[in-house]
Image: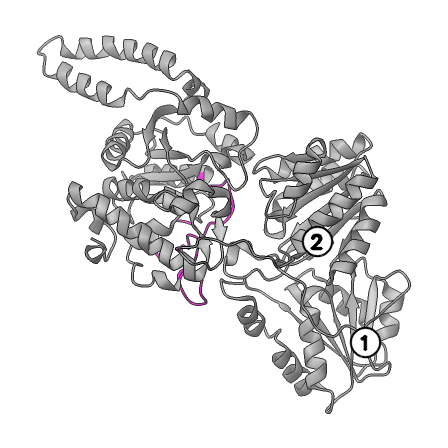
Amino acid sequence: MLEKINKPNDVKLLKEDELDTLCGEIREKIINTVSVNGGHLGSNLGLVETTVALHRVLNLPEDKIIFDVGHQCYTHKILTGRKDEFETLRKMDGVSGFTNRFESECDTLTAGHSGPSVSTGFGIAKANKLAGKDCYVVSVVGDGSFTNGMIYEALNNCCDKNVNFIIVLNDNEMSISTNVGNMANHFSKLRTSKSYFKFKKKLKHAFRKIPVVGRELERFFARIKNFLKRTLVPSDGFFASMGIRFLGPVDGHDIDKLEDVFNEAKNYNECCIVLVKTKKGKGYEMAENHPESYHSVGKFETDAGVVPKNTYTFSDCFGDIMLEKAKQDSSLILLTAAMCEGTGLLRFSNEFPDKFFDVGIAEEHEIAFASGLAAGGMKPVCAVYSTFAQRVYDQVMHDVSIQGLGLTLALDRAGFVPDDGITHQGLFDVSLFSSIPGCSIYSPETYDEMKDVFSRAVDNGKLNVVRYPKGCMMNYDRGEFVYNGNKTISVCGEDRAQVVIVTYGRVTQNAYGAMKLLKDKVSVKIVKLVKCYPLEEQELLEQIKDASLVYLLEEGIKSGGVAEKIACLSHGKIVGKIIVNAVDGQYAFHATTEQLYSHFGMSQEKIARQIQENI
């Protein structure tokens, strides 16, 4: 059947009895591709039939589908002319693992974060009405995203009765980590309700065939229907109270029923919520049985499934540090936003359940909640991916910094993040948080530095950010590096070197490699900042004042970054030339870390070449 799918809307040409075969072929293609390239597996396998049904009742690209988060779009990409390129998924210059509006006109948004789909979808739907267009907008939202406060801000505004907007609430009983809180309990009630949709539809058609009194009978039984609905599906009153029509629940793997309910929602010409029930990992037994292990995966053998890796990562190190610290300090509290396993806190959550809080996909609440814990005498540590840290800027400033409270923000996935692409890079955190008064930022490059930094940060009662990359510590000869007294700076190389490279974090390895490439051509010294903000000005100036070339290397954005701050600090105080090598004026795309280093001129070969050209 996939041979017949070459462009948008081709799926409408298939017969109903061909759709199951199509879904099986799509699943096979997704499994085979993800097993080679890595990617988000469980959520995509669970959404195949729902996506097929949407494509059969909508007209793309005139109608719009917005996938909240965006990583569950694989079926959508296959159905919209990217079937033949799908094998390049997450590869450099290939198909993105998320929706990307620059890749296809059928991708409404370049999406990678949870929460904005309802707001944006409602905005597009309203713009369509204002422009006189009669097309539809559908936002597909996972039940886990309903822990995100932005969803409720949007729902509060969605009671407009003259807009073609449908919210598909995908209940797969599984967000990235297990759903938590009252909203999860709310959807559990909805799962137990009986559908009355087909009965209602048949009854309506029967009444309309009765002359004279048919319409009155239809209205009478509509009142009875609403009574039954309140009785059988009591929890839909939550949405009804917001003025939003509710349909479902419907089996998210039954295309015939899905098409019926989606067409019904279209007929209302107002904002509707359709609850679909899907099984994460559908069609791949291992993913069905262990959905938490198949959310985001690397390469694996399809017959054997995902085999846990034994490699020790920065996330693992963070979890171990917090575990040991909690055994010594009863005031330590750990918080995360639906990223328990991703941030290395699974063991901590099991051993110290009373000291661990997973707040769901609600980073803003996480920080404000932590500020209250700090005000109550606790020592909160908040684990957040760097790419999501931009969401907590307001809370870090208003609820922590201005209040003079202590909090440690542990930023996982800092710097370049491979494969996931433009929305998941950790390049902005230093620039963001260095603008907040009283905030100290650390970027440990080794596990030992990480232990030392967290020991200092958790206990000093101040606002601290500790950032570290995805994956393992880089292995190279660090024997030449010598730390200063408080271990916030380390230096490697000749004392009176012609070139001084100032850097921090994981990219230090590339600086070291460049120094070795240049050893017979020019003398080089590396100054590695463990504490990258505030700058230790006098000590740093002493290290760079006599160099012919000061090379500032930063795996982050240039504007507002550490390199830019050092350049300003050094103006008129050093004798040599200053070069800044940082990400400037662009976003990073999906590629391997090595490819990103090469593209942005941060590989050891390109660093060495640039130094030679400017010495």
Residue displayed at 88% across by 73% down: 542
Residue 317 part of the magenta-drawn span: no
What x and y, as percent, mark residue 397?
72, 42
Of the residues shown, which amino acid type is indicated by label 2? Cys
Residue 408 in sight from this viewpoint = no
Q: What crowding class fits label 1: few (fewer than 14 Cα within 10 Å), some (14-19), or many (20 or more)? A: few
Query: Given this view, does label 2 or label 1 mark the residue nearer the observer?
Result: 2
The rendered magenta stretch, by its main secondary structure, is classed as: loop
User: In which quadrant of the rendered view does residue 89 lie?
Assistant: bottom left
Measured along the vertical axis of the image, is residue 277 above or below residue 70?
A: above
Element assignment for label 1: loop
Q: Please give the range of residues in magenta.
A: 89-117
Residue displayed at 61% across by 44% down: 391
Question: Mark 1 = which residue?
Answer: 480
Residue 123 in sight from this viewpoint = yes
Element assignment for label 2: helix
Is the C terminus in the top left, top right, bottom left or bottom right quadrant?
bottom right
Of the residues shown, which amino acid type is indicated by label 1? Glu
Which residue is nearer to you in this view: 29 or 425? 29
Q: Earlier in the sequence, mark 2 or mark 1?
A: 2
Which residue is nearer to you in this view: 133 or 442? 442
User: In which quadrant of the rendered view does residue 611 lie?
Assistant: bottom right
Residue displayed at 72% across by 67% down: 563
User: In which quadrant of the rendered view does residue 279 lie?
Assistant: top left
Which residue is nearer to you in this view: 432 or 460? 460
Question: Mark 2 = which residue?
Answer: 317
